[in-house]
Image: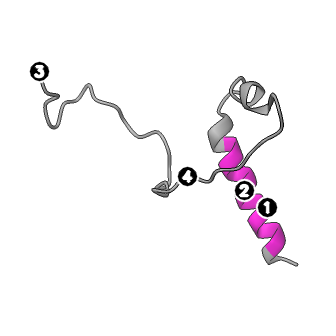
């Protein structure tokens, strides 16, 4: 059965800002991927850190 449009039980956005369609990808060190997934709210925290890195470069 297809999912009905305007279903109130569907997934809801919990982020404040729109996300880019293309992901940011990089290769981490061995073991980082598994450890990162154990950090609560790691994706949003990483997005905030990337914004901070960009601000630091802009201020130089």
Which of the pair 42/12 is nearer the observer? 42
Q: Earlier in the sequence, mark 3 or mark 1?
A: 3
Indicate the position of residue 23 as horizontal and vertical percent values: 55, 52
Indicate the position of residue 16 as horizontal and vertical percent values: 50, 50
Mark 2 lies on residue: 50
Front tag of 4 and 1: 4
Calculate the distance from the C-alpha at mark 2 to the C-alpha at mark 4.
13 Å
Q: Residues within 10 Å of mark 4 (few under 14, many from 20)?
A: few
Q: Residues within 10 Å of mark 3 (few under 14, many from 20)?
A: few
| Residue occupying the point 61% across, 54% down | 24
| Residue occupying the point 75% across, 66% down | 54
Front tag of 3 and 1: 3
Calculate the distance from the C-alpha at mark 3 to the C-alpha at mark 1.
46 Å
Which residues fall within the magenta stretch? 45-57
Calculate the distance from the C-alpha at mark 3 to the C-alpha at mark 2.
41 Å
Q: Is mark 1 on a helix, strand or loop?
A: helix
Mark 1 lies on residue: 53
Front tag of 3 and 2: 3
Mark 4 lies on residue: 23
Check if mark 3's residue and mark 4's residue have beta carbons within 8 Å. no
Q: What element carries label 3?
A: loop
Calculate the distance from the C-alpha at mark 3 to the C-alpha at mark 4.
31 Å
* Quadrant in the picture for the C terminus: bottom right
Mark 3 lies on residue: 1
Check if mark 2's residue and mark 4's residue have beta carbons within 8 Å. no
What colour scheme was applied to this rendering of the protein? one colour
Q: Which of marks 4 and 1 is nearer the N terminus?
A: 4
Determine the main secondary structure of the stretch shown in magenta.
helix
Check if mark 4's residue and mark 1's residue have beta carbons within 8 Å. no
Check if mark 3's residue and mark 1's residue have beta carbons within 8 Å. no
């Amino acid at each position: 059965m297809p999912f009905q449009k305007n279903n109130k039980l569907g997934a809801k956005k919990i982020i404040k800002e729109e996300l880019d369609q293309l992901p940011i990808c990089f290769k981490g060190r061995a073991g980082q991927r598994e450890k990162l997934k154990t950090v609560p709210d790691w994706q949003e925290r990483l997005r905030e850190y990337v914004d901070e890195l960009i601000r630091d470069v802009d201020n130089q």
